[in-house]
Structures are given as structure tokens and as C-alpha cells.
Image: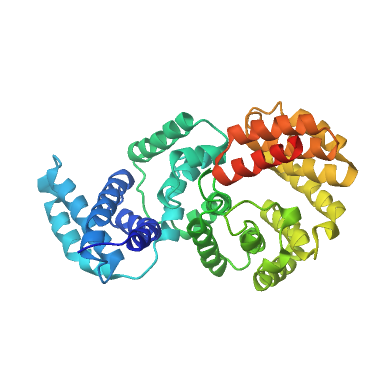
Amino acid sequence: MTHSPALEVTIEHLLRELTPQVLGTVVRRFRDFASAEDAVQEASLAAALQWPREGLPINPRAWLTQVAFRRMADQIRSESARRRREGEVAAETLLVTEDAASQEDDTLVLLFMCCHPALTTPSAIALTLRAVGGLSTAEIAHAFLVPEATMAQRISRAKQAIKTSGIPFQLPTTDERTQRLRAVLHILYLIFNEGYTSSAGPALRRADLSREAMRLTRILHGLQPDDAEVAGLLALMLLTDARRDGRSNKDGELVPLARQDRSLWDKKQIEEGIALISATLPKGAIGQYQLQAAIAAVHDEADRYEDTDWPQILALYEVLRRLSGNPMVALNHAIAVAMVHGAVKGLELLDVLARDSRLATHHRLHAVRGHLLELAGDSAGAIEHYRIAANKTASLPERNYLLTQAARLSS
């Protein structure tokens, strides 16, 4: 059977969507994360080879689950404890059809399972971004502002910690889910961010990741409707994603917020996000996601960039900066300071941020410095930092945009 490029793209997207669901099912059944991950990867590889030739199966998820279950059964049979577990293997094999045919989405379950008590929160988040988000080690390292080798070691140690802890890798209890909720929210936040602005590659965004993060956050909000931070995160995603169609032109080139055609923004999504955050803010203690959603709402409510209420945004960032140790929050705060009090004040804050090792080599620090130097009238300095930022980013649309800014000022 011949296959088309369109089918290959469909298969790629389908595997990205289904892999975490299947992994959740396999881990839930066998309670062995490392082996389950290997089995699911083998199943995905088999699908990538067979489906283009033979066509998509009627139930792709069931197909993947059956193959992964068979791989796990084969592995169990080959272990030294084969005789002791042979009866278990037979039972698992009998349950393959039932589990594989189930339409229950185990992705959210997998999120909570990955926040294992044997792991530190950063390690749990890194592991889950691999398992659920499908992010590469390099992409996760970018999100954590650490070298790729460091992140690879962290993920490897996380898997080993689970294996040696003796604590089952299984569905958490209600109390455990409550304890792990904040880590789950952070994971969803990072998956969304990687989807909305890809850290590497030819595309500005990966819509599959941002959509999946929003879908899972909606499910979580349905399960925890009274949790203000869950609602805040969903509102933040809605309000941010609403601008997606204005962020690039027909050629896929990045369009900055100041020059976006706001008629392209998703008004219904903005209305939903504003309604959600407006209902959430008065309920109690304010958290980081609620504050970020409130900032996104101020941007979205402005009919023109010139109408943006920067003093209100700055006030919100002042509160957010006190709650968060995230250097990106501090960087955005510096931008808001510049917009309210002038570029020179913003540049003074950047000098302080440049001493933060997590941010010092990041392309966005140089991109912001270039922008503020341009606003301050220092074209030569702006050109220099636009070019430095372009050389540091692995995102092709961002690199092209930054080089275009440098070329514009050079002409």
C-alpha cells in the first residue's frame, strides 16, 4: 500500500496524542514506569513503520496498547522470576483486549502518577514532561534553564529513584493527588508554553502540545472546580492561546504583540478566560497562575497596543515577582517597568538580572535588552543584542525575527 505525506503527518500527530494515554494504561497495569516506557516506545516505532504501509487500524489506541502489553508480557517471561509471575502474565494477557479497548483517557492519571513520592518536584516535572508532554530532553532543559546534559542525568536519576524506592508506581489516592496537584499544574503550564512558543525548530508553535495542555487542564478544572489556581491556569491558557492567529503572518513569520492584528484574536476564548479569572480572583488567596491570567486579561482587553494599561500590568507583576522566584517573571517585570517609567529604568533592572546564572545566557535576556536599547535610542547597542539573541535561540522564527530587527536598524 502506498502512503502519502499527509498520512505520515496524521500518524505523527496521532502517535503524539496517543502515546501518553497508552503509557498511562500500561503503567497502571504493570506498575513499572521504565519498562512500560520502553514497551510503549517499541509499540510507537512499530506503528510508525506499519501504519504508513498498511493504513490506520480501526482503533489506533487499542492497537498500540496491545503491542505494548505484548512487549511487557515478553519481558516478564524473560525475567529470572518467570515461573513465579507466569500466572500473572497469563492474567495480564487476558486483560489486554479489555484494557486496550477502553476509551478512558489515562493521560491525567499518568500526570499524577509521575509526581511520585520518591522524586523531588523538579525531577517529577522533568520526567512527566517526557512521558506526557512528549518533549525532548533539550526542550525540557530549555524550560528549566539548565544544560541538556544536566537534564538527561536528572531524568535518568528520576527513573532509577522510582525503581529503587520500593514505592509502587501506581494510581495515587485522593490525598496524594491533592499533595501532587501543584507539580501537576506546573507540568501543564510548561507543556502549554512549549506548545505556544516552541523553544526549537522551524515552527513558531506546536499546537498539539498547547491543545493537549488545555484539554487536560479543563479536565482537571472539572475535577477541582473550587481550586483557584487550577482555574487561574486554565484562564491563563485561554487568554494566551486566544492570540495564536495574530502571532504569525501567512509566511509563518513572528509578529510581535505591538503589531498584531487584534481582529484575528479569538474573542469567545477571551470572554471565557476573562469570565473565569474574574470569578476566581475574589475567592481567596491569589496564586501565580491567577496573577499571570490577570496580566493576560489586561493585554487582551486593550483594543490597540497603545491602549494597554501598563501601570496595571506593572502592579500585577510587582505582586507576582514577590510570589515567584522565576527569572522570566523578573524579566517581564523589567519590560513593564520600561513601559511605565522609561527604557533606562528597565535596562537598569536587566543589569541585575544578567547576574542570574539561569538567565545570563538565555536569548530572551538579550532580545529584551535589544528592544529596550532601541526604545532608548541606542541603535548600535540594539543591533548588537538582537544579533546575540538570534545566535542563542534554537527557534527559527524567533531567530529570523531578531535578525530582521537588527537589519532594520542597520539600514
In front of the other: 44 or 176: 44
Report if residue 118 is visible in the image.
no
Residue under the point 44% across and 43% down: 136
Report if residue 354 is visible in the image.
yes
> Does residue 230 appear left or right of residue 213 in this picture?
right
Q: Hey, which residue is sitting farthest right in the picture?
A: 341
Please tell me how many numbered marks the rendered image carries. 0
In front of the other: 166 or 199: 199
Q: Quadrant of the N terminus?
A: bottom left
Depicted 196 relative to depicted 377: above or below: below
Q: Quadrant of residue 359?
A: top right
> Does residue 272 appear left or right of residue 223 in this picture?
right
Residue under the point 32% across and 53% down: 27
Depicted 314 relative to depicted 219: above or below: above
Q: Position of residue 164 (x, y in %)?
A: 34, 36
Q: Position of residue 355 (x, y in %)?
A: 71, 26
Q: Position of residue 102 (x, y in %)?
A: 31, 70
Q: Hey, which residue is sitting farthest front in the picture?
A: 411
Q: Position of residue 336 (x, y in %)?
A: 81, 46
In front of the other: 115 or 295: 295
The image's colouring method is rainbow
Q: Quadrant of residue 230?
A: bottom right
Q: Quadrant of the C terminus?
A: top right
> Does residue 77 appear left or right of residue 151 in this picture?
left
Depicted 296 relative to depicted 79: above or below: below
Depicted 14 relative to depicted 364: above or below: below
Q: Hey, which residue is sitting farthest bottom in the picture?
A: 268
